[in-house]
Image (cartoon, coloured by chain):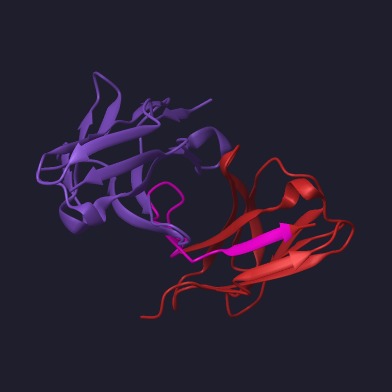
């Protein structure tokens, strides 16, 4: 099976712009989660989608949003970019049928740099 | 709130020696624990998880982890380290209070010296 794919792999944007990141989960997986990884804050949970519905949400401002399509692919959007949004954005997919025991499988990430 | 701690920022081990990467957790109820590894410029790779049952969990690449309920620990181990094991290791626990979000440790950098 193909793994989780994320596009693009690298992005450079300027402050105030917006950006959309894409994630294609492993075939058969219905849950997609997004994380932000920075050296200072580590791994922080953004949100999780399951069957096109947001099932869980972390503590990020409303500038960060996402959605999931009927084929389980997901997109994440960040509006009005700030310098502090520079990070590695990771997408993870899982079967989604057990919140407690599901294993998440990660994509390679999108490296976002905000100038 | 549930949490997980990785007390060592970095662990140095000589190739061929056994390695241990430490993880302790704080949860209410049954813990669901995970280990992941991250190589430079890559996403995280799943190593193993503890849900229930045998306290010794075997995972990928020869790694195993020992669940110890009394010490609330879930240390990652490998009998003989390889230089290629050098990477960043993360422990995580499911947080029942936040709809089973994964709560992550800060990560431990493992360096295996030839």
Q: Is residue B76 visible?
A: no
Horizontally, residue B81 falls left or right of residue A104, namely: left
Which residue is depicted at the point 57% across and 42% down? A39
Horizontally, residue A109 falls left or right of residue B110, namely: right
Which residue is depicted at the point 63% across and 69% down? A10
Total numbered labels placed on residues in the image: 0
The reply to whether the magenta stretch includes residue A43 is no
Q: Is residue A112 visible?
A: yes
Residue B44 in the image: above or below residue B112: below
Q: Position of residue B9 (x, y in %)?
A: 40, 31
Residue A112 in the image: above or below residue A59: below
Q: Nearer the viewer, residue A89 or A26?
A: A89
Horizontally, residue B81 falls left or right of residue B105, namely: left
Residue B98 in the image: above or below residue A76: above
| Residue A50 found in image quarter | bottom right
Q: Which chain is purple?
A: B
Residue B17 in the image: above or below residue A25: above
| Residue A3 found in image quarter | bottom left
Q: Nearer the viewer, residue A113 or B22?
A: A113
Q: Position of residue B72 (x, y in %)?
A: 30, 23
Q: Nearer the viewer, residue B46 or A15?
A: A15
Viewport quadrant of the N terminus of chain B: top right
**What span is colored magenta in the figure?**
A94-113
Which residue is depicted at the point 54% across and 33% down? B97
Q: Position of residue A34 (x, y in %)?
A: 60, 57
Q: Position of residue A110 (x, y in %)?
A: 60, 65
| Palette colour of chain A | red
């Amino acid at each position: 099976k193909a793994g989780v794919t994320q596009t693009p792999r690298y992005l450079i944007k300027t402050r105030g712009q917006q950006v959309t990141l894409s994630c294609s989960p492993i075939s058969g997986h219905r849950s997609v989660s997004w994380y932000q990884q920075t050296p200072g804050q580590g791994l922080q949970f953004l949100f999780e989608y399951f069957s096109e519905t947001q099932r869980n949400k972390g503590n990020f401002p409303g500038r960060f949003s996402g959605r999931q399509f009927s084929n389980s692919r997901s997109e994440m959007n960040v509006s009005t970019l700030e310098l502090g949004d520079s990070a590695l954005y990771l997408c993870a997919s899982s079967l989604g049928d057990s919140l407690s025991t599901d294993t998440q499988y990660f994509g390679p990430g999108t490296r976002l740099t905000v100038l | 709130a549930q949490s997980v701690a990785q007390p060592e920022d970095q662990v140095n081990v000589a190739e061929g020696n056994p390695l241990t990467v430490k993880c302790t957790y704080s949860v209410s109820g049954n813990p669901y624990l995970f280990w992941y590894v991250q190589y430079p410029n890559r996403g995280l790779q799943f190593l193993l998880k503890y849900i229930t049952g045998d306290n010794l969990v075997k995972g990928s690449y020869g790694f195993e982890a020992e669940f110890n309920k009394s010490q609330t620990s879930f240390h990652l181990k490998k009998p003989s380290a390889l230089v290629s094991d050098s990477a960043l290791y993360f422990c995580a626990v499911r947080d029942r209070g936040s709809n089973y979000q994964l709560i992550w440790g800060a990560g431990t950098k493992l360096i295996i010296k030839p």
